[in-house]
Structure formats: structure tokens, C-alpha cells
Amino acid sequence: MTGLPGGVYQDKMRPLRWCFCPLFLLAGSLLWAEDLPLTRNVPIPDVQSPNESPKPYDFDAPPGGMFRNIVLAEGFEEELGFQRTHEIVPVRPTEQFPAGRSPIFIVFEFHQHYQSFQVFGRCYPEEVAGLDGRTVFAEDAMYIALEDQTGYLKLFPAEGPWKPGRYKVEIHAGEQVNDTSLMGTMRFTVVASSESQVSSDPR
């Protein structure tokens, strides 16, 4: 023991006792870790259930993903939503339309999104006599702001009326149409006016 001023003594061995404790704990932890069983690396297919395999996205079907709902319709209406926002709702949803020049609407609703973008619709005559299926027959685009939860596209034939047959509409989303912007495909049928039970009054 070492004397200090004022008659106070200090034990030289006391600091050494505190140094030994962490060493004992560390050594004990290492011994306990060595006793743990090791698990071999298992290939992912061995632990995955066949039913858990992700379903491939179908770009030839109606869009999913950020689209909560999307339908073809004769028209649309604007309603005031519960958050005091203007919501676009379809009027007389259908996949069959009369021949002529009446516009065809595609009305959609989104899941929550965190940036603005555009939705594009490009309509092709898939099975229409006398029309090239690779030529765009009608198209439209709509800018979707951050607060927008609904929207619509208005398809109006650029040249001549709608002719009887089957049409497909490619739905794209993004800044522009490119190889990666396709979200899905909608389809509808145009029938002769005498065969159609759908009103042809445009909105």
C-alpha cells in the first residue's frame, strides 16, 4: 500500500482486480461461441416451397402493380372523395362498344405513389379486317400528379370510325413510352351498331 498526503492509503492491487474481470468474461464468451452448432450453407431452392415461387408478371393482361383498378367504359364522372379530392369513376363499364366515332374511355385507380408520371394508352387493331395490327389506331396520355389517385384515357380514332373487330390497348407508365414502360394490355371489341346493346352517346 502506498501512502498519500493526508494519511490516505491506496491499494496497488485494486486496479488489477478490475482488469481481470473483462478478460474472464471475454474468454467465457469465446468458449460458449465455440460450442454453438454450425449450420451448413443450404441452396435457396432447397428451402423454398414450390408454391412460393414468384408468379411471372403478364404484360399481355390488364395492368397490375401500382394500378388498383382499371376498366374500359363508355364515359366517366368526377366525384368528390372523402379526402375532398376529385375522383374519376367509370360510367357503364364494358368491353364491347359500337362501331362509329364515339370515344372509348379507360378509367383507372392507383395505389399510393410517391412521384408524378404519365400514363399512356396506345390502341392497335388486333383482329380488324383491312387494318394493320402494327399501326397505332388511337392513343392518349394523361399526366398524373403526386396527389392524383385516379385518371382516365380517352381513345378517339384518328382516321375513320371504329370498325368491327378486336382491339388491344397497351398501357404504359413513366416519362415516355419505351421498352421498359409497358404495364399491361387491355382489350375490347367493336361490333356493328345493330348488334350492339351499348349506348353510343359520347360524354
Image (tube, rainbow, N blue to C red):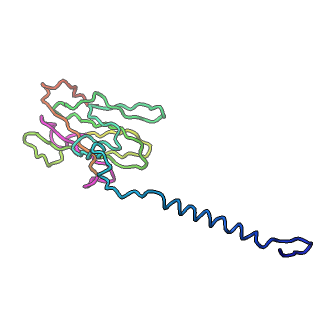
Q: Which residues are magenta?
A: 155-180
Q: x and y percent of residue 172 in the render?
A: 28, 48
Q: As displayed, is residue 101 above or below residue 124? A: above
Q: Quadrant of residue 166?
A: top left
Q: x and y percent of residue 173 in the render?
A: 31, 48
**Image check: 29 left or right of 65?**
right
* Residue under the image location 87 percent in, 75 percent down: 3
Q: x and y percent of residue 150 in the render?
A: 37, 38
**Image check: 113 left or right of 198?**
right
Q: As displayed, is residue 143 above or below residue 14? A: above
Q: x and y percent of residue 141 in the render?
A: 30, 46
Q: In the image shown, does 138 or 179 lie closer to the viewer?
A: 179
Q: In the image shown, does 14 or 193 lie closer to the viewer?
A: 14
Q: Quadrant of residue 55?
A: top left
* Residue under the image location 7 percent in, 39 percent down: 129
Q: In the image shown, does 141 or 49 lie closer to the viewer?
A: 49
Q: In the image shown, does 58 or 191 lie closer to the viewer?
A: 58
